[in-house]
Image (spheres, rainbow, N blue to C red):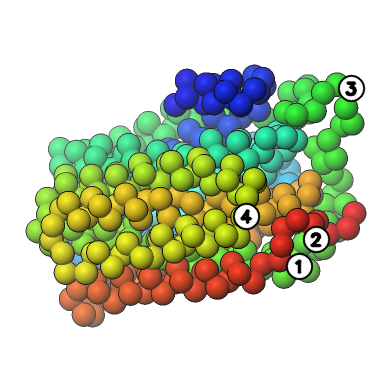
Amino acid sequence: MFKTIKQTIHNNGLTWHYAWIIVLIASVIQTLASSIRMTFGMLITPLSESFNWSQGEITIAYAISNIVSAVSAPLAGSLGDRFGEKKIMIIGSIIFIIGLIFTSYSKNLTTLYISYGFIIGFGHSLLLVPLIPVIMKWFKKHLALGISVWMTSWGIGPALSSPIIAALLDQFGWMKTFWILGIIFTISIIYLLRYFHDNPTSKGILPFGISHNSDRPENNTTDPKTTQKLQKLIRNTHEYWNMCSIHFLGCVGHSIILIYIVTLALFQNITLIKASIVLSLMSGTSIISRFLTPLICERFGIRTFMSISFLLQAIPILLLFGTNNIWIFYFFAVFFGIGYGGEAGGFPILNRRYYGNAPMGGPTGIQFLGGGLGMALGGWLGGMLFDFYGNYDLSLILSICASIAGIFSILLLQNPKRNLISK
């Protein structure tokens, strides 16, 4: 991946800057965390078989985790703005690791809800919410390319980890698998955070795109009173809340698929390994659209492209009704992955267009809040509806409806050609 990024930088006539190291670190951290969170659906069948728990009971843990992440996301963003993102990320990584180890000892639902739901959920928020504001601080120009590189990590994690976790589950069982994941996560995070810096000032350099002869960036550091004033202005805009609702609807739509695509395939008598390949293929395809979306959004219409992505997240689901053909699952995974990958890429660009160089912890946090609540609702409802009706048809219909509703919400956004706040 690093060679590809360097080649892309070279092809675009860009120069090397420590900002790219920050992006790479953020990408690896995101890859590791998303590998664990996005493959939860693979645990449903092993847990159900081991403890005779229903899908609805198991996915309550996933719902709690996303609700906790969502509710704590604005706090994580604000704490990062106030005390520095790296400090908050270190605390978050410690909590996340504790949650992983604690989950490996879960033998009843209460313990699972506490460990995976509350502990991992809170750690996940503190670890990942600060990443976007940090990337935005490091780029004065070419922010879209930086975000594009980082966005690919959301797809790389599940794409690479799905078959690996399936093999670990098959070989060691789910408890030892969590121990193995915890060890890998701990070693990786400790190493990566050594080279992570909140902003260019702490490294003694200027953001990418600013020369020594240019004006200094407007917002590397902002005093608390100014930050509070700017965040109040941002909260008073309609777009601040609407982007939260868009993220909510989009995440309801794809969380149902992410969590239940493996169990849906197993329900249709497809093997676990083949089912994991569906999830891997879907996540792998999303890498392409994740990388391209911010670049396309910056040059063309952000709202138009986001609407197309939501549509591609909805229409392919029609292929899943009543099929047990693995090739149809693979075909679905490719097209759904394109829409799923493009769904969230426009948010950082919209934030920059609407709010300029204002501190982004608050807006990022509220958007994570919407996304987390959407992931929680979709992830839980899919299992509950299956327990009640004995199939996934209503869950698939809910996914389609949520994505279509997201399109209408996108159309309510103002034209992002002007800044919405005054300084």
Task: From the top left corner, tell me how far across and down residue 420 is, in percent.
Answer: 80, 61
Residue located farthest toward the bottom when viewing the structure as drawn? 388
The answer to whether one can see residue 4 in this image is yes
Q: Residue at x 71, y 66 (%)?
A: 414
The residue that disc 2 covers is: 420
Could you say which is closer to the camera, residue 31 or residue 300?
300
Going by the numbered disc 4, the residue's amino acid type is Gly
- Return the residue at label 1: 237
Disc 2 secondary structure class: loop
Q: Earlier in the sequence, mark 2 or mark 1?
A: 1
Sequence-wise, which precedes: disc 2 or disc 3? Answer: 3
In front here: 222 or 23?
23
What's the CA distance linking mark 2 and mark 1?
7 Å
Residue lying furthest front: 300
Q: CA distance from mark 4 to mark 3?
A: 33 Å
Q: Are marks 2 and 1 in contact (CB under 8 Å)?
A: yes
Q: Which image quarter: residue 163? A: top left
Q: Amino acid at mark 2?
A: Leu
